[in-house]
Amino acid sequence: MQYSRFVALGDSQTEGLCDPDPRYEYRGWADRLAERLAQLNPELRYANLAVRGKTTRQTREEQLPRALAMEPDLITAPLGMNDVLSSSDMTRIHDDLEAVYDVLAGTGATVLISTYPDVARTIPLGRRLEDKLLALNDMMRGFADRYGFVLVDLYTAPVLTDLRTWAPDRLHASPLGHERFAAGAAHALGLPDSSPEWGAPLPSLQDPHRLYRHVRDGRWAVQYLTPWMIRRLRGRSLGDGRTPKRPDLTPVIEGQPLS
């Protein structure tokens, strides 16, 4: 199926943090998917409304009305991870997700969502989030079944438990991780030449010594975890004051007219 108007909603994952791009600062899995879709339809128009740090409720209030006005035929909206990081109220998180997804389901567009990778295997202290993460993933599967959404199951992809698919902060995907997510989305959408092996593990490396792992995890806590906790205590977000990188539907392939 060819799409003509693709709008991406979400947070840092969809904005593309840690996947550098000279034009938009960050590229990310959604931009990579748009480029792949444009190979099938060079007239594809694409907007990316995602902003780092946004919760589902903020997405509903700030991004959803703009997306609906664009009348997209493809919408990507993997949401909820920032909610899980900042709240333990899973009922509220479910209700906020349902409020967004119920509206998206009524648009007639193809809607793509995802589960989230197993952070218990990549982030120190990640096991403290495991129960909430599993609950969120169950919600995403439930919404996909209920509304007929396309689901990319990142949780079951072995490649995403490999630190090579994660940036040094382990909260955002590396360029390779974004590439694999885009490949998973392409396969879930049934795009030509997409591969069911998108989540296959990378060639194995020698396991580092336990002492090295402890030192590495300690440095991570000082460099990344502590600043995140300070921002959270102050009620601040990396997305404060930021605007979307691609706020309007524009051609993916340069030179296409804006008709």
Image: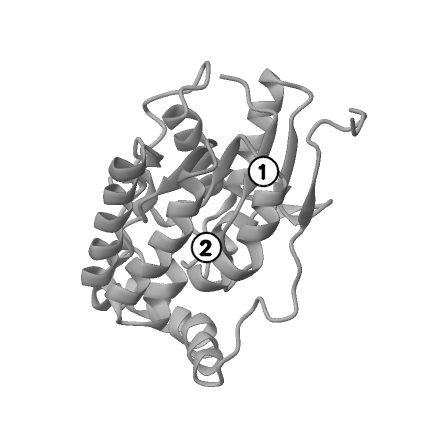
The quadrant holding residue 92 is bottom left
**Would residue 215 be found to the left or right of residue 77 on screen?**
left
Asked whether 61 or 141 is in front, the reply is 61
Residue 44 drawn above or below residue 60: above
Amino acid type of disc 2? His
Q: In the rendered picture of this protein, how many numbered marks are placed on residues?
A: 2
**Would residue 47 be found to the left or right of residue 214 on screen?**
right
* Separation (CA) of disc 1 from disc 2: 15 Å
The picture places residue 144, in percent across and down from the top left corner, at: 29, 38
Residue at 51 percent across and 56 percent down: it is 12
Q: In which quarter of the image is the C terminus?
A: top right
Badge 1 or badge 2: first in the primary sequence: 1
Mark nearest the camera among 1 and 2 is 1
Residue under numbered circle 2:
172
Q: Determine crowd level at label 1: few under 14, some 14-19, many 20+ residues with C-alpha closer than 10 A.
A: many
Residue under numbered circle 1:
31
Amino acid type of disc 1? Asp
Asked whether 214 or 109 is in front, the reply is 109
Residue at 29 percent across and 68 percent down: it is 214
The picture places residue 93, in percent across and down from the top left corner, at: 32, 62
**Would residue 124 be found to the left or right of residue 41 on screen?**
left
Specify the farthest residue to the left: 131
